[in-house]
């Protein structure tokens, strides 16, 4: 020991004292330096780790967020864990409060009042967030990259390509207006999805009145120019038609008195009624009010073609009669479609045959492990408890014999069809078997009330349609459903086998419904996913989700559950209809003030709240701005 050098003594000290295994030693000799960092024992007791490798170990997980709409902004606002490096990519550098877009089209509210710069939203957060104004055109799930284009210069020859790596990807790009491939819609109609759309409509309305006021026009020409057609009887179309009616009758007729008799507003809806997603009382009131206001409501009218002068409709009933009507402006509000970048991505992940991107109940894109999709660009593919087996028109052996007389192409198509449906039904059928096995802890091949009660909470959490079915059937628990199917009134004596269990649950999947493509759904999804990211490390060690019926343990998180908080339908004339939780319906002037208060509270910042309330006050005192700017 006495003959050992200082370095050898230090080495032996590290070998004998494991607590010093991560000590940093710095020697300075004659102005030079030597740095050693021990992280694990090596032959001489000290291992030297490259500082860059240490940085890689401590590197933050990169989360790339595509889009700054309701879902993306809600995710950013609620993300609190500073261990993430967040990159936000969107062609618009602001969040828009889209429920007020119809008000922007007529000057009730100014466009600047309902937008908030995304940098303002994230600048005070303790999370590292960067924003790039670009548009994603391709997602490479295999290599975990997104490809984007930025055209801030406005010159198509100066487009900048950006490639961003990610650890987690949050897709919230929204959707585009759905034209249903009807000829002329994209070229001749106005849409109402973005701030720019609302501003274009506002300018077009004023331009129509200015054109109709020009001399040397016939009455027929004025009527054509001032014929405003709204396609779509959903909340957006109905609200715009109501706002436009108020704008014309309260403001524009005072400025253009000579053309007031030529104005006509037509609302086209392909189904039998407008506002189909609302209570029938609201639908009836809205239709009667529009009739009193002079809005021409045409239900059962499906648009088949739009030219620069006329719009052609076909009656769904009455023999499919086709009629043409001239117009001055058409606003198209008939639903949403999938964006091209999402359609291309769906092919990558094996969802090319779907109409919209599918996720699981945790908002993770099916077929991936680190990509999440929220809002209008995706839908939750809720698992079914069971599905009726398929019945084949011929047996499989007969199919093999008869296939020899069919063309090779047809045989291939039939075989693929049968394989797909057999595998799909087998997989879904296994869910009911997996639930039964998990509940049957004593492996008796039957379930008692006690065994089932121990698993009931997890079943309802994993399959929300079960709870909805019980509520609609007015049953206090699924145990009552088992008793009902068994016909046994004794509480503890109820025992069911697999077939009886399947019979009891045979109708629960009928309660499954897709979530509506609304701002309310998107905002709740963004908040839910941010909460999952905030607690990801904790839930890895302490999972809190339902039981894994097909595996061991529990899921990390509880599945996403949408909580409906009600919906409004402004109908003009300071009257609004509201359908609130508990099937409570309110219609009239008092509901309009409820609408004001709720929307003001939902605005993203105090700045936008102040601006919107100021716009409402200005409109009450001075009327709407009719400059078209």
Image: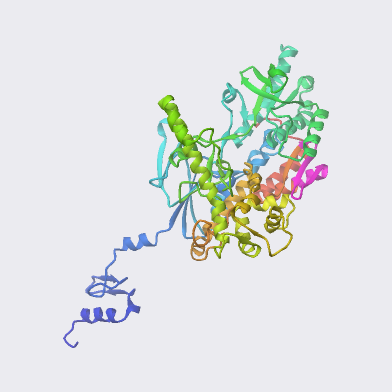
Quarter holding residue 238: top right
Q: Can you give x and y, in whole percent of width and height, for residue 276 in the image? A: 72, 36
Question: Image check: 251 left or right of 198?
Answer: right
Q: Quadrant of the C terminus?
A: top right
Residue 302 in the image: above or below residue 476: above
Q: Position of residue 150 (x, y in %)?
A: 45, 38
Nearer-the-camera pick, 199 or 459: 459
Residue placed most toward the observer, 571 or 419: 419
Magenta segment boundaries in residue numbering? 571-595
- In which image quadrant can residue 266 be found? top right
Pick the front one: 319 or 301: 319
Res 562 visible: no
Visible residue check, residue 119 = yes
Q: Which residue in the rendered view is the most extreme toward the bottom?
A: 2
Left or right of 182 in this view: 258: right
- Residue 267 sits inside the magenta stretch: no
Of residues 221 and 438, which is closer to you in this image? Answer: 438
Q: How many marks?
A: 0
As drawn, 543 above or below 569: below
Q: Position of residue 399 (x, y in %)?
A: 46, 32
Q: Quadrant of the N terminus?
A: bottom left
Residue sitting at x 52%, y 37% = 354
Q: Is residue 182 above or below residue 136?
A: above
């Amino acid at each position: 020991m006495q003959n050992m050098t200082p370095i050898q003594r230090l080495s032996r000290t590290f070998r004998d004292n494991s607590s010093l295994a991560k000590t940093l030693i710095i020697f300075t000799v004659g102005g030079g330096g030597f740095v050693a960092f021990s992280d694990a024992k090596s032959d001489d007791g000290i291992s030297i780790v490259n500082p860059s490798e240490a940085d890689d170990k401590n590197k933050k997980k990169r989360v790339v967020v595509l889009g700054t709409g309701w879902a993306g902004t809600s995710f950013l606002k609620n993300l609190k864990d500073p261990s993430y490096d967040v990159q936000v990519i969107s062609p618009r550098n602001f969040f828009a409060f889209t429920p007020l877009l119809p008000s922007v089209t007529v000057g009730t509210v100014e466009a600047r009042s309902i937008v908030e710069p995304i940098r303002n939203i994230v600048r005070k957060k303790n999370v590292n967030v960067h924003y790039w104004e670009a548009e994603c055109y391709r997602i490479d799930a295999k290599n975990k990259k997104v490809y984007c284009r930025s055209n801030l210069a406005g010159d198509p020859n100066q487009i900048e390509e950006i490639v961003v790596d990610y650890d987690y990807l949050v897709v919230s790009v929204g959707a585009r207006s759905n034209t249903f491939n009807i000829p002329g819609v994209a070229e001749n109609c106005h849409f109402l999805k973005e701030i720019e759309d609302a501003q274009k409509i506002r300018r077009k309305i004023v331009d129509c009145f200015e054109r109709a006021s020009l001399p040397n026009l016939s009455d027929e020409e004025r009527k054509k120019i001032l014929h405003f057609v709204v396609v779509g009887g959903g909340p957006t179309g109905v609200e715009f038609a109501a706002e436009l009616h108020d704008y014309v009758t309260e403001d524009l007729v005072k400025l253009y008195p000579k053309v007031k008799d030529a104005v006509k507003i037509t609302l086209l809806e392909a189904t039998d009624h407008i506002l189909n997603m609302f209570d029938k009382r609201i639908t009836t009131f809205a239709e009667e009010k529009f009739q009193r206001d002079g809005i021409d409501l045409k239900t059962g009218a499906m648009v088949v073609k739009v030219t620069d002068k006329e719009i052609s409709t076909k009656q769904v009933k009455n023999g499919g009669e086709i009629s043409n009507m001239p117009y001055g402006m058409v606003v198209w509000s008939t639903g949403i479609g999938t964006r091209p970048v999402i359609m291309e991505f769906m092919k990558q992940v094996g969802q090319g045959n779907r109409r919209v991107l599918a996720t699981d109940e945790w908002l993770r894109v099916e077929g991936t492990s680190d990509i999440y999709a929220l809002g209008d660009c995706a839908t939750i593919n809720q698992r079914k408890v069971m599905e009726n087996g398929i019945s084949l028109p011929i047996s499989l052996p007969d199919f093999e014999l008869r296939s020899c007389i069919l063309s090779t192409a047809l045989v291939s198509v039939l075989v693929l069809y049968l394989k797909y449906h057999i595998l799909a039904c087998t997989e879904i059928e296994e869910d009911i078997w997996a639930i039964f096995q998990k509940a049957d802890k004593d492996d008796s091949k039957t379930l008692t009330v006690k065994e089932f009660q121990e698993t009931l909470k997890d079943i309802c959490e994993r399959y929300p349609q079960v709870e909805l079915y019980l509520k609609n059937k007015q049953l206090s628990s699924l145990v009552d459903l088992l008793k009902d199917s068994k016909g046994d009134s004794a509480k503890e004596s109820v025992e069911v086998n697999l077939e009886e269990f399947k019979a009891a649950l045979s109708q629960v999947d009928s309660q499954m419904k897709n979530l509506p493509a609304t701002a309310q759904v998107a905002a709740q999804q963004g908040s839910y996913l941010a909460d999952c990211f905030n607690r990801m490390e904790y839930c890895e060690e302490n999972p809190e989700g339902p039981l894994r019926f097909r595996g061991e343990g529990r899921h990390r998180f509880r599945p996403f559950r949408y909580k409906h908080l009600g919906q409004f339908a402004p109908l003009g004339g300071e009257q609004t209809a509201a359908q609130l939780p508990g099937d409570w319906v309110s219609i009239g002037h008092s509901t309009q003030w409820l609408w004001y208060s709720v929307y003001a509270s939902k605005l993203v910042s105090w700045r936008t709240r102040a601006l919107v309330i100021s716009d409402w006050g200005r409109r009450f005192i001075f009327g709407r701005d009719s400059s078209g700017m």
